Image (cartoon, coloured by chain):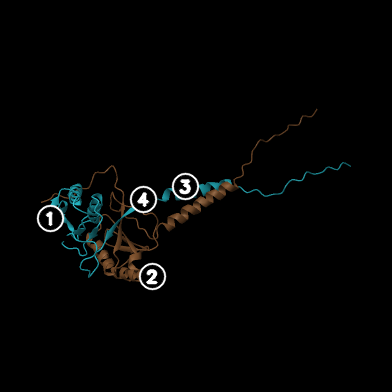
Amino acid sequence: MLLTRQSRKPTTGQLKMASMIDVVFLLLIFFMCTSSFRGQENDLPTRLPQVGAARDGLHGDFEPIRIQVSKVHAGVLVTCAGRPCQSFDGLVEHLEAMRRIADLPVIIEGQDAVPFRHMVAALDACYRADLRRVAFAARGGGP
Amino acid sequence: MRLRKVKRTYGCEINIAPLIDVVFLLIIFFMTVSQISRVEVEDLALPEAEKGETPQRAPAGRFIVNVHKDGRIVVAGRTRSITALQGMLGRELEERSPEDLTVLLRGDQETRWEDIAEIMRVCAGRGIGRVRVAVTEPDASEGPDAPGPAS
C-alpha cells in the first residue's frame, strides 16, 4: 500500500484588486480635476475716520490730499487736489510730487456708482507713491 | 520514457496594499481640502493692486466680509443683511477690543462703491478703524486700467 502524502495547499482566499484600483484611481482623478486652487491673495491696509472724531492722528498738521473718483460715461474721472488725472499712473505722478513735501494724509472719496476696483486702484496709487496715511471718506455721495 | 512537461510559472508579486493606502489618503485629502476652503472665502474677482501685502498668517482677530457685485454680503458662508452684519460685529467686539479686530473686506471688482462704503460706515460706527481690502496681483500681460478721459 502506497501512501502518498497529499500536498497541503494553502486555503487562503484571493481578493481581486484590479477593479478596486481602477475605481480608486478614477475617484482620485475626478477630485484632482474638480478641485481648483486659488491664486495668492494680498491685502491693502486702510483706515476709517472714526465717527464723532473731529481730527484724529491721521491728519496731523497737514491738510489731507483729497482724491475724488467720479463715474463718467466712458469710465471714471479721477481728480487729485482738484486737478484731473489722465490715468491712475498720472495720479501716481501727482502723488509722488506731493510726497516730496511730506507723508501727507490722503482721503479718497468716491461716487456711489463707481466700481470698487477703481477705488482700490486709487488706494494702490497712494501706496505706490509711498503715501501710507490713507483713508476712505466716511460718506459716499453722488449718483 | 515518459517525459513530463514541467510547467514553470514566472511571476513577481507586487504588494499593492501600501499603494492603496496612499491613494485613499490622497482622496480623503482632496475631499476635505475642497470642503474647508469654501467656508469663509467666496469665489470673487478681486480687484488688482501692485502694493498688496502678503498676509504672513491668518490673524486670530480677523473678520472676513465678502461682497458680491450685486451688493450681497456673505459672512461665514451665509448671506447676511447689513443689520445682521452690525450684530455680528457687535458680538465680535464683546470678545475683543476694536484695536485687536481686523476686518478683511473682500469685494468683487464690479461691486458698487456705495455697497462697500456702507460696510465701512458700519465698521466706523462700531469703532473699528482697521480695515484691510483683499486684492490680487495684477496680471503682467494686461496693461494698466486707465480711467475715463478728464473733462
Label 1: which secondary element: loop
Q: Which residue is mark 3?
A: A29
Q: Which residue is mark 1?
A: A82
Q: Name the chain letter of the residue that bears numbered label 3.
A: A
Q: Specify the amino acid type for callout 4.
A: Gln
The residue carrying pointer 3 sits among few (fewer than 14), some (14 to 19) or many (20 or more) residues within 10 Å by Cα, namely few
Viewer-proximal residue among B144 and A133: A133
Q: Tell me where residue A59 sits by quadrant.
A: bottom left
Chain B pictured colour: brown
- Does residue A116 appear in this view? yes
**Whole-percent x, y for residue B35 in the image:** 43, 57
Look at the image and tell me in which quarter the N terminus of chain B lies: top right
Label 4: which secondary element: loop
Give the farthest residue toward the top: B1
Q: Which residue is mark 2?
A: B95
Q: Which chain is cyan?
A: A
**Both marks 2 and 1 on one chain:** no
Q: Specify the amino acid type for callout 3.
A: Ile
